Image: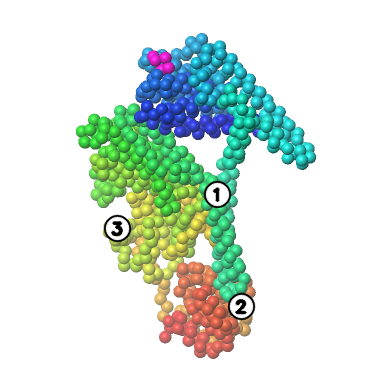
Amino acid sequence: MDEMQEIMEDFLVEAFEMIEQLDQDLVELESNPDDLELLNKIFRVAHTIKGSGSFLNLDILTRLTHHMEDVLNKARKSELKITPDIMDVILESVDMMKALLENIRDTGSDVTDDIDIEPVVVKLDAISNGKNLSEVSNTSSEPQVEEKEVEVAQQVEEDELTEEDYANMSPEDLEAEIERLLQQRQEEDRKKREAKKKQQNNEQNSEPKKEEKPKENKETNTPAPVQQPKSNKKEDKKAVPAKKLSTVEQTIRVDVNRLDNLMNLIGELVLSKNRLIKIYNDVEERYEGEHFLDELNQVVSSISIVTTDLQIAVMKTRMLQIGKVFNKFPRVIRDLSRELGKKVNLIIKGEETELDKSIIEEIGDPLMHMIRNSVDHGIEPPEERIALGKPETGTVELKAYNEGNQIVIEIADDGKGMDPDILKSKALEKGIISEKEADMMSDKEAFMLIFKAGFSTAAKVTNVSGRGVGMDVVKTNVEKLNGLIEVDSTAGNGSVFKIKIPLTLAIIQALLVAAQEELFAVPLANVIETVRITVEDISAVEGKSVLKLRDEVLPLVNMSDIFKIEKILGVNQYLYVVVLGVGASKVGLIVDGLIGQEEIVIKSLGEYLKGIKGIAGATIRGDGKVTLIVDVAALMQLAKETHANSVISTTVETKKKKEKPEDYVILIVDDSNTDRKIMKKSIEPLGFTIKEATNGEEALSIIKNDTDIDAALVDIEMPKMDGYTLAQEIRKYNRFKNLPLIAVTSRTTKSDRVRGVEVGMNEYITKPYTPEYLTNVLKRNLKLS
């Protein structure tokens, strides 16, 4: 990279960081105009940007910051007082500085037809000269004044200690000093370039010469930025840059794409870790008691711990303080309160709370809408507040804090609050809800009406509000981040908005649930609780299924109905309900099984499958299979469309009752033709229908595709898939959890029997056996008399 380009990039990074804080500092200065320390801090920012801009030949930026610096310098010398009108001009110049910096970042130059600094320069000049701003016309400066500015633009950054001396110099002495400083800076740059060339040439020399290079390079770089032109202490000069060099080496700038790629690789590593743990569990079951399991366990545990630590470390590299977003709101509040004629004090807490970079980038706009909403709709005008016995100045509190695996952003105001009855009547008036819905709506549900598209309580349309656009966008954007919004309000006392969002979007905690034989991952952040109920607990209200859970009535919907999954499972004594919540809305989701909690990596569905309603993405489980991740917000909407009394009738389905042996189908699984014949001959007299399989894979295929199998006689030692693995695979399916599996084997040890029970065998028969014993075991498991 070219040296000047590198300096330019460093300048832009530094300038944007300083400008970001400047808005907040200026708003604070307006409230405390006598705070000299704050004024000096702001002055130094303008001074630094001017000096660096001059060195990089950014004349327009230098000219603007020089005029701004003049105003700030007079303020810190108490020659003028910062009024709201003067602050408007300073803030306008800061906005222009931002625009110029963005243009420099995009084009490498501050020259553009889109930005005209002359009107602002004229205003700043008028303020410096003590003129009335209302008399200032938006015309360009006089030519002679402009010539003077070009001369001043040649100034470079100087030390604060010598600044007062420069102010007392005559114009001729000042011009000579500027020329001297510029020549000195150019000489330093020339030496740096020569040193760089020399360093490149030395790279081809012998190793001992390389060892001398750092020393040589240090001395070449010894001149510090020209902050103490009168100092003659060379050794001090050498010490300062050496210290700076070591400080710079503590941090490096990394391309965001590299961090994204690293995060993707960590995601793959997490998937591999889950897969490794699953394989270990399978191996442990098969080889229980073997010595190598202890070593394998240590390795798997170590990999799991290191992967988790690595995941946390990489996530932290992507974390940014939410203050990066919060810092722009003091300016927003200040401008908006002036526009609306209100007095508002913003209190910020928890700005050091960290969030993933991708979420930081997305959360700014929703927060902006909500802050503006609090000032416009929440805070009353000063005269109204005084009449109500409130302080003249309203308060908006913005704070962030951690709550489990989530970040909570809270926006509270002490304004007029919201009346649920008024919200309902407005919604009825606009046709957003029906009268029936309004009657059944709770206060919290009424507060959520403000997030409906087209809803607004503003009496008239203004630049700030009234069009019913904004809060619905907030809700949509927050839900895209897998977040939710909660609202609480008391009429006359103010409102509190809580936004809950995950720490990161890449890896999340999820609850795995089963809908028939399909598994789904539900983000744990949206799961309020899980309950087990019976069919008798379900009630019907107006033809719709509901569950009375403590003091709440929850609408119920079957997950299989939402995603139109064919119902192939038999009757279950119990039903599992996952209570989901988004904002004030709740729904009970009936599932066929709760698998457990798991850390999952979110994967995109790709171009062809994206946009499927109710599905947010997919993940790969420990067994290598793909599981779809539920989009809870969309699922809640689908649940409203699906919600009907079909939950009871479709859940309670019974299989055709079998009364005599001829109705039963028995599957014999054995790789030995002789053994199959012996078993067949033993049970044929009872009149069973018999099917045969020669290995575990064939048997599993028959069982999955033939729902009439009532019991299976299974050998253990078989090719392709043994009896233990077959039983384990069969028990993975809910519909086969009650299927009698009877092991018929010559393996007689206690550990074999224990393992048979663990994988799901109902009975364990050892060879040889009598036909009577086999038929009795079979009849007992089929509950035949």
Of 399 and 672, nearer the camera is: 399
Seen in the picture, residue 372 relative to 356 is either above or below; the reply is: above
Closest to the observer: 335 or 81?
Answer: 81
Residue that badge 1 annotates:
314
Q: Secondary structure at mark 2?
A: loop
Structural distance between the alpha carbons of marks 2 and 3: 54 Å
Say above or below: 546 vs 292. above
Query: Is residue 300 left or right of 131 when viewed as pictured?
Result: right
- Looking at marks 1 and 3 on the same chain, the residue that comes earlier in the sequence is marked by 1
Which x, y percent locates residue 106?
A: 56, 29
Q: Quadrant of residue 382?
A: top left
The image quadrant where one finds the N terminus is: top right
**In the image, which residues are magenta?**
127-131
Identify which residue is drawn at 59% across, 51% down. Answer: 265
- Placement of the C terminus among the 4 image quadrants: bottom left
Q: Position of residue 177 (x, y in %)?
A: 58, 17
Residue marked by disc 3: 553
Horizontally, residue 422 falls left or right of residue 581, namely: left
Q: Nearer the viewer, residue 762 or 297?
A: 297
Gap in Å between the C-alphas at discs 1 and 3?
43 Å
Report the residue at 43% width, 19% height from top. 124
Q: Is residue 710 above or below residue 117?
A: below
- Is residue 251 inside the magenta stretch? no
Q: Which residue is mark 2?
A: 717
